[in-house]
């Protein structure tokens, strides 16, 4: 038995034929004649010393050897393709593909992109608003913005600003509900997108931190944080707003935080990218721009009292 790997062209022919279960369709995919593809398959079988396909009347099927080989060959070509795309991206200093959750994209990134575009007209930004945990190589992603706690092994990870939640509302609601106690009579909006956090940072936790014996249960509930914030902006009620998603609206006066208190989430947004790519020109420019934008609204956090709820 020969240990040396067979030619890549023969493996490519086998991969196409195994996926299509047709020599004719495989030949069409690879832009070769059916005879040429059949020759490649035959040479691969000779190299292995066993048949990979059973030739039937007007079809083919894999033998046991073919069944054993097909998944590994498919995975191998997928890995090669991902590696090639990654190598190509390293030569590209103009395109930046970023993935972030829908709420962060809508409430933090989108309203600020004009400033980045003005400062870096040479960078073409592409966004994928998704909570799916993407693979940098497979999905051709340069930067991921993710929220949570814990470690990020194997990647460059930069924690962004400390996250907190605080009651935010329109100025009209602030006039109607001037104290924290008065919120027990207010229409409350529930953001269920961070219900996974432990310890919890929901309305019950906030009232508990304020020393108010009140467990709210009624009010509109949203699975997406940006929808909850939009409801507050529309005057539906008062929401526990997450720092990153409300600071721009607070800074520009559309929402207010009249009680000056917040509770920590215990989690943060992180700037993630493959190790070794953090100083690529467009990645570095985007990272530094994000940090500068966060700093513009740091005065809002500085003016708050963050109440530690760990012991409450």
Image (tube, rainbow, N blue to C red):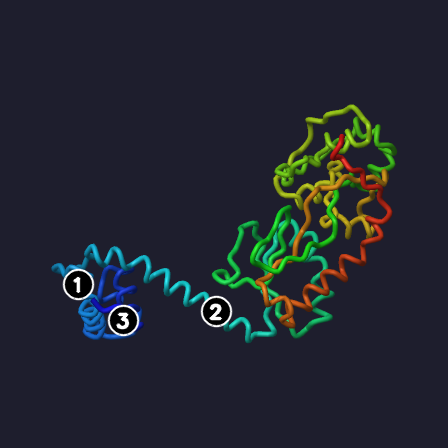
Residue 191 x %, y %: 67, 38
Labels 3, 2: front one: 3
Check disc 3 and report its element: helix, strand or loop: loop
Q: Is residue 226 left or right of residue 54?
A: right
Distance of label 2 from label 1 (alpha carbons): 34 Å
In this rendered view, identify the residue nearer to me: 249 or 30.
30
Residue 68 x %, y %: 26, 56
Residue 260 lies in quadrant: top right
Other-residue count near label 2 (Cα within 10 Å), few / some / many at <14 / 14–19 / ≥20: some
User: Which residue carries the number 2 mark?
Assistant: 85
Residue 4 makes an appearance in the image: yes
Residue 96 lies in quadrant: bottom right
| Mark number displayed over residue 300 | none
Residue 287 x %, y %: 69, 63
Q: Is residue 137 left or right of residue 210?
A: left
Q: Is residue 262 left or right of residue 283?
A: right
Residue 46 x %, y %: 18, 69
Residue at x-position 13% and y-position 59%: 56
- In which quadrant of the rendered image does the N terminus lie? bottom left
| Mark number displayed over residue 50 | 1
Q: Which comes before the other along the chain, label 1 or label 3?
A: 3
């Amino acid at each position: 038995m020969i240990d040396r790997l067979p030619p890549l062209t023969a493996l490519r022919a086998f991969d196409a034929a195994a996926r299509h279960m047709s020599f004719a369709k495989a030949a069409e995919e690879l832009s070769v004649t059916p005879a040429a593809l059949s020759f490649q398959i035959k040479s691969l079988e000779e190299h292995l010393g066993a048949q990979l396909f059973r030739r039937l009347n007007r079809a083919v099927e894999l033998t046991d050897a073919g069944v054993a080989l097909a998944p590994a060959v498919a995975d191998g070509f997928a890995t090669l393709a991902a590696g090639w795309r990654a190598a190509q991206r390293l030569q590209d200093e103009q395109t930046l593909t970023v993935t972030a959750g829908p709420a962060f994209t809508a409430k933090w990134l989108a309203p600020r992109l004009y400033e980045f575009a003005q400062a870096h007209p040479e960078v073409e930004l592409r966004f994928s608003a998704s909570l799916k945990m993407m693979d940098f190589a497979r999905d051709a992603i340069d930067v991921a913005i993710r929220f949570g706690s814990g470690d990020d092994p194997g990647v460059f990870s930069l924690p962004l600003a400390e996250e907190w939640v605080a009651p935010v509302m329109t100025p009209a609601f602030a006039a109607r509900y001037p104290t924290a106690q008065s919120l027990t009579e207010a229409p409350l909006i529930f953001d269920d997108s961070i219900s996974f956090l432990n310890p919890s940072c929901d309305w019950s936790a906030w009232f508990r931190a304020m020393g108010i014996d009140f467990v709210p249960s009624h009010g509109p509930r949203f699975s997406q944080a940006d929808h909850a914030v939009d409801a507050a902006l529309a005057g539906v009620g008062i929401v526990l707003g997450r720092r990153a998603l409300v600071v721009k609206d607070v800074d520009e006066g559309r929402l207010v935080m009249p009680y000056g208190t917040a509770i920590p989430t215990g989690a943060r947004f992180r700037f993630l990218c493959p190790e070794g790519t953090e100083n690529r020109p467009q990645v570095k420019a985007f990272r530094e721009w994000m940090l500068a934008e966060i700093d513009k609204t740091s005065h809002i956090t500085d003016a708050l009292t963050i109440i530690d709820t760990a012991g409450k």
